[in-house]
Amino acid sequence: MAENKTTPLYEQHKKSGAKLAEFGGFLMPIQYQSAIEEHLWCRKKTAVFDTSHMGQLLVEGNTAQSELDKIVTVDTTKIPSFKCRYGFMLNEEGGIKDDLIVYKISSEKFVVIVNSGTAWADKEHVEKNLDKARLSFLSDNYGKIDVQGPVSADVLKDIFSIDLSGLKYYGFGYFDILGESCIVSRTGYTGERGYELCLPNSVIVEVWSKLLDDERVKPAGLAARDTLRLEAGLPLYSQDITEATTPLEAGLGRFISFDTNFIGKERLEELKNKISRKFVFFKSDSRQSPRHDYKIYIDGESVGFVTSGTFSPCLQRGIGAGYVDRPQVSAGQQIVVKSNGREIKCTIINKPFVETKK
């Protein structure tokens, strides 16, 4: 454990008695009390998550826009300033090196948020493929807190006097928080209305403490974050999508712009009409929960495997996602999920599992 990295909020998590575990190379809070209670609190009020383990890359310079377009699947020329977009970095075979969010400050300045476990590899990949643009690793001096839930805007306004009413979904801006200029975006990984705060390490502990002083706010760990994102139908890198997965078979083709010449584009164009498997979401007919690597069967035939599975606190039943070698399957299809003699009857659905208000 001593070899794991920690975030600036590590001491606060220890003092709170949170259950800690390694995640993406970091020692992170998995839960503070009950993961189910944290999940439901986020759906009803506001939960805060320490996401300082995520990587923050700054790409800037006169050629930043054109050079970044060679690396990510997002067409940055079509992103208005102070908007952000979800996309990918791919390998030459079209496999997903990482999923990410690109924040466009201007045509000469971008922030890219990447996953913790791949952050250093992403940094090296971007560095390798930049020519004149400059790359900085902001994570050395900045952390991140996600404030998620129906009353998150009111909480942030009441505590820090910042008015976020004009911030549209996937928009961001600079806001003064405790005397520091911080990026606040209307984004998140829970399906709820919420915000992500990129904060200098100098103020992040005080920001966290002030948030938790509000009775509408409770801390939530990565266990609740995982169940929240699955209910919202959001994929998890390293489970649902990997370098062995293309965005096309993962059903994420809408996040690819074929107008730019990004790494992996040529291979994806070859694969467009050759997709042999499909990423599906399904719910259990009972409280039994599917788990990672369980096998998926249709009419007694093994057709795929589960990548994510859990118990849904909102639906009070098992939910999951996975790949099936039946690209033609659709919502309503009955499947059976099996492992070691255990069988769970499920039904494929259209995502999300739970309707929320972003």
Image (cartoon, rainbow, N blue to C red):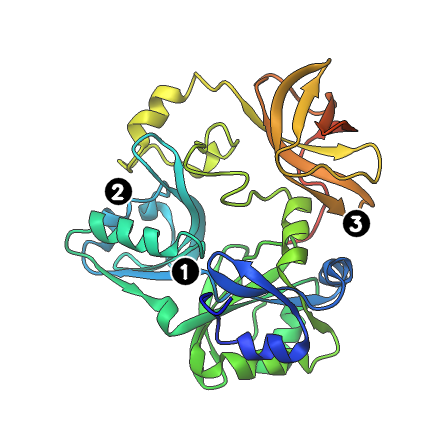
Closer-to-camera residue (247/168): 247
Q: Quick check: can you spot residue 166? A: no
Query: Residue at the location (68% across, 50% down)?
Result: 227
Cα distance in 3D space between marks 1 and 2: 20 Å
Amino acid type, callout 3 = Cys
Q: Which mark is residue 70?
A: 2
In the image, residue 51 lies at what x, y percent?
52, 64
- The numbered mark, 1 or 2, whose residue comes first in the sequence reads 1
Nearest to viewer (mark 3 / mark 2): 3
Q: Of tags 1 and 2, which is closer to the observer?
A: 1
The mark nearer the N terminus, 3 or 2, is 2
The amino acid type of the residue labelled 1 equals Gly
Is residue 237 found left or right of 348 in the rendered image? left
Residue identifier under label 3: 314
**Marking on residue 55:** 1
Decide: is 272 above or below 358: above
Task: For the residues labelled 3 and 2, say whether their Cβ atoms are less than 8 Å apart.
Answer: no
Q: Position of residue 106 (x, y in %)?
A: 31, 60
Image location of residue 58, percent across then percent down: 31, 62
Name the amino acid, label 2. Lys
SS category of the residue bearing label 1: strand
